[in-house]
Image: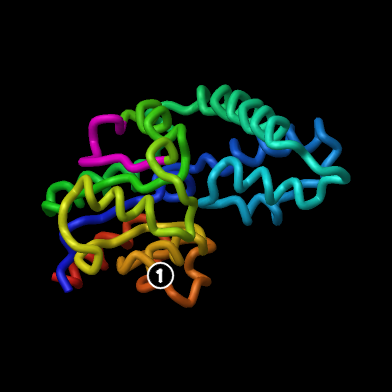
Amino acid sequence: MKYHAIIFDLDGVICDTDRYHYQAWKKIADEEGIYFDEEINRRLRGVSRMDSLNIILERAPRTYTQEEKDRLCERKNEIYVKLLGQMNRLSLAPETRATLEELRRMGLKMAIGSSSKNAKFILKRLGLDDFFDGVADGTIITHSKPHPEVFIKALDLLGGRPYESLVVEDSGAGIDAAYLGGFASIGIGDAKNNRRVTYKIDKFSDILDIVRQAG
């Protein structure tokens, strides 16, 4: 099967922003007196801001109103965006940049499919704001992964059919979303452990081998 399009998750795939998410959520949890650690943080990958908060609040000693939840999400985002300000073009690994450029030369259409509402801001910090053919992010979706909505909307921006497209993910929820949407998937990091993953890679540049072998 020759692939014509490739859709990338952003956090943990194109760049490493997971530590910024962790630091921001950790600060919120500490302020609220809620236990939070790296294991809980792994459950938040690929999940929307509000759904992430709801996971954290599973450990809360009290119930929160929707207004309080909205306030905490806004506070978390303020902290997170401030941390993102530390990113620049050098934050993008040379291997990642070179791989993306080679995929472009090979003629593939490329998009971002991310639950993050800050995706375009992050891409701009990395110098990739004009690189992709489309960006589907948290500002235009209703459902978080494992719902396939974000990948379906990304493909709408590219054209083509799911089975001719690849999704690159680092989370199990993202692999499930790709599977439910009818996409082939490439798993890196924790995503390699998902039984629904199509291909497993150890490093970003391995994507090139998959595309070449597919024809």
Q: Indicate whether residue 3 is drawn in magenta.
A: no
Q: Residues within 10 Å of mark 1 (few under 14, many from 20)?
A: some
| Side of 58 where 2 appears, left or right | left
Q: Residue drawn 48% across and 60% down?
A: 146
Q: What percent of the width, then of the height, locates residue 96?
A: 34, 46
Q: What percent of the width, then of the height, locates residue 215?
A: 13, 70
Q: Quadrant of the N terminus?
A: bottom left
Q: What percent of the width, then of the height, locates residue 132?
A: 24, 40
Residue extending farthest to the bottom is 195
What are the residue bounds of the magenta stretch? Answer: 128-137
Q: Coloured how?
A: rainbow
Q: What percent of the width, then of the height, locates residue 129?
A: 29, 30
Q: Indicate whether residue 130 is drawn in magenta.
A: yes
Residue with the mark numbered 1: 200
Dot 1: element? strand
Instruction: Give the answer, above or below, for where 158 lies relative to 21.
Output: below
Which of the 4 quarters of the picture holds residue 10? Answer: top left
Instruction: Give the answer, above or below, for where 45 lies relative to 85.
Output: below
Q: How many marks?
A: 1
| Side of 20 where 215 appears, left or right | left
Overall secondary structure of the magenta section: loop
Q: Residue drawn 37% across and 55% down?
A: 204
Q: Residue drawn 34% across and 51% down?
A: 8
| Side of 25 where 174 appears, left or right | left
Residue flagged by tag 1: what amino acid is it? Answer: Lys
| Side of 147 where 53 appears, left or right | right
Q: Residue drawn 20% across and 56% down?
A: 5
